[in-house]
């Protein structure tokens, strides 16, 4: 399960239910009639607190935020909605004079910003487009639910395309005895994924034995991996099985395989090819039947080309290569991870009443997280343990997270006196972001803090297409 914050309210939800948070006056009678004629079930709440209560009980398909009623707290409300209800589609509506706020609303997680006064036809069209987005999201949620039905995979939190692709392939690989090579930066969850693969394999009733090839001195690693016989070296007072023998019938997880010394690489290759090994001091080989999973945060191909990692061993290990993406490449998963760690750590440390306001999410989502998921978890644990008050504030964040997130208010906009086109502004921002990253859609989407799918939709909407020569290395 992904956590209680993602649970669907028990109340029956209309497929076209709309909750307006803010003043009812933002929708005139004609617009309300158009909504009703289009099949929309409209509910309203005068302020943020009552609006959040209505979402908990009614579970609307779309939330409409009246920007003029929300005032300066409009962005904070959107952030809080996105933080508490990551699956909810949010549409903001307000005057054109709040153009900088409109841009920030999109950054904060709003699907769209509509300029008031708005007629019923324009509003219903925008809501229908938002529903289409929700329908596109449903397959992702269904895929995530199907993955979570398999033990161990629920510990790898996220719904980003990059993560779900890796988890889907891992689930397929788990059903075989093929060797799996897990790659990815430190802290991305390789050990969790190795455990999930084992738990869903035919060897799940047998042990999963782990050895960290980088944590054991080279002179001791061979003995730890393959075992030794009595008297084989000073201090060997009895026969000792190695990790490979202990994994017989199960799975051997070789973490940090890139740190394996050259001499042991040869012996590991023999274990893979022939299913046998020699203990230190033994005169005959020992046969074992195991499944092997290896992991590394190093580039084995570069090591192979440099001569520090055997080519034949690399190709034996990389039968099924799976890469866990760094957190900076799946920033849309950060709110889910924050929720997961925050709720778990509150229970662990008895801090049930502690609150993490939604306005802090941009500080967390805007950081590049070089230590990946592990670093994020450590930061959340620090906040839970050290925050003295009942509400976490910006001052409680580590100093390197306290920098202000990029704010649209700091953009210098030369607004014309007579007429202003919000769509033109959005088109220009997207165009500049694409140019900034040489039309790489993935990087531009990350910079704008939107999904790549949303960026592609906006590009198609405004007819933005880069030349092939402008798109080096872009995945699509």
Image (cartoon, rainbow, N blue to C red):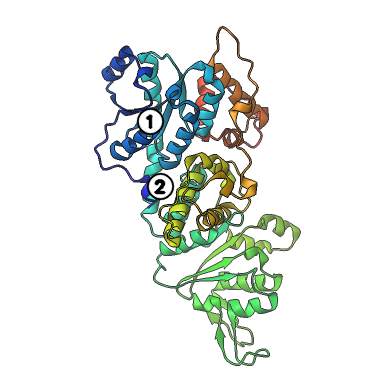
User: Which label number is shown at residue 85?
Assistant: none
| Residue with the most extreme front position | 389
Q: Residue at x 56, y 80 (%)?
A: 242
Q: Secondary structure at mark 2?
A: helix
Q: Which residue is identified by label 2?
A: 144
* Towards the viewer: 462 or 15: 15
Q: Secondary structure at mark 1?
A: loop
* Towards the viewer: 279 or 316: 279
> In this view of the protein, can residue 175 be seen by the observer?
no
Residue 235 image offset from top left, x and y in percent: 65, 90
* Towards the viewer: 258 or 312: 258
Of pointers 1 and 2, the one earlier in the residue sequence: 1
Q: Quadrant of the C terminus?
A: top right
329 relative to 156 in the view: left or right? right
Query: Marks 1/2: CA distance?
Result: 33 Å
- Neighbourhood count class around disc 1 (C-alpha, 10 Å): few under 14, some 14–19, many 20 upward: some
Say above or below: 446 vs 191: above
**How many discs mark residues in the rendered view?**
2
Residue 153 image offset from top left, x and y in percent: 43, 56
Callout 1–callout 2 Cβ contact below 8 Å: no
- Neighbourhood count class around disc 2 (C-alpha, 10 Å): few under 14, some 14–19, many 20 upward: many
Residue 346 image offset from top left, x and y in percent: 44, 56
Q: Which residue is identified by label 1?
A: 47
Residue 131 quadrant: top left
The mark closer to the camera, 1 or 2, is 1
Q: Residue at x 57, y 32 (%)?
A: 448
Q: Residue at x 60, y 81 (%)?
A: 278
> In this view of the protein, can residue 366 be seen by the observer?
yes
Say above or below: 197 vs 354: below
Residue 353 image offset from top left, x and y in percent: 41, 52
Residue 350 quadrant: bottom left
């Amino acid at each position: 399960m992904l956590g209680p914050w993602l649970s669907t309210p028990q109340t029956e939800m209309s497929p076209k239910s709309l909750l307006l948070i803010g003043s009812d006056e933002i929708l005139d009678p004609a617009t309300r009639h158009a909504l009703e004629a289009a099949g929309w079930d409209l509910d309203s709440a005068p302020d943020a607190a009552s609006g959040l209560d209505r979402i908990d009980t009614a579970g609307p398909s779309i939330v409409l935020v009246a920007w003029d009623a929300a005032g300066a707290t409009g962005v904070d409300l959107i952030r809080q909605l996105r933080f508490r209800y990551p699956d909810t589609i949010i549409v903001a509506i307000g005057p054109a004079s709040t153009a900088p706020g409109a841009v920030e609303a999109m950054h904060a997680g709003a699907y769209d910003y509509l300029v008031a006064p708005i007629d019923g036809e324009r509003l219903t069209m925008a809501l229908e487009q938002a529903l289409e987005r929700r329908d596109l999201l449903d397959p992702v949620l269904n895929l995530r639910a199907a993955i979570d039905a398999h033990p161990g995979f629920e510990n790898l939190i996220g719904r980003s395309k990059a993560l779900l692709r890796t988890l889907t392939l891992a689930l397929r690989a788990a059903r075989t005895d093929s060797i799996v090579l897990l790659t990815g930066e430190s802290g991305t969850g390789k050990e969790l994924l190795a455990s999930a693969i084992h738990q869903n394999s035919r060897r799940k009733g047998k042990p999963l034995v782990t050895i960290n090839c980088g944590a054991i001195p080279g002179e001791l690693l061979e003995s730890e991996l393959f075992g030794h016989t009595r008297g084989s070296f000073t201090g060997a007072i009895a026969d000792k099985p190695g990790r490979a023998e202990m994994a017989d019938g199960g799975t051997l997880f070789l973490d940090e395989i890139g740190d394996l010394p050259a001499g042991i690489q040869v012996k590991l290759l023999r274990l893979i090819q022939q299913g046998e090994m020699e203990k230190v001091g033994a005169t005959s080989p020992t046969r074992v039947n195991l499944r092997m999973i290896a992991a590394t945060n190093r580039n084995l191909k570069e090591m192979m080309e440099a001569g520090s990692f055997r080519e034949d061993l690399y190709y034996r290990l990389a039968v099924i290569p799976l890469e866990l993406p760094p957190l900076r490449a799946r920033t849309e998963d950060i709110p889910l991870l924050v929720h997961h760690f925050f709720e778990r750590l509150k229970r662990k440390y008895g801090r049930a009443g502690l609150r993490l306001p939604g306005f802090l999410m941009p500080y967390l989502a805007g950081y590049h997280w070089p230590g990946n998921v592990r670093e994020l978890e450590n930061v959340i644990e620090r906040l839970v343990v050290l925050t003295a008050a009942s509400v976490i504030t910006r001052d409680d964040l580590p100093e390197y997270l306290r920098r202000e997130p990029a704010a649209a208010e700091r953009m210098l906009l030369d607004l014309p006196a007579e007429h202003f086109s919000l769509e033109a502004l959005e088109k220009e921002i997207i165009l500049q972001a694409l140019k900034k990253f040489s039309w790489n859609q993935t990087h531009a989407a990350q910079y704008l803090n939107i999904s790549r799918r949303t960026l592609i939709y906006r590009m198609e909407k405004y007819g933005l297409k880069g030349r092939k020569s402008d798109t080096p290395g872009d995945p699509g």
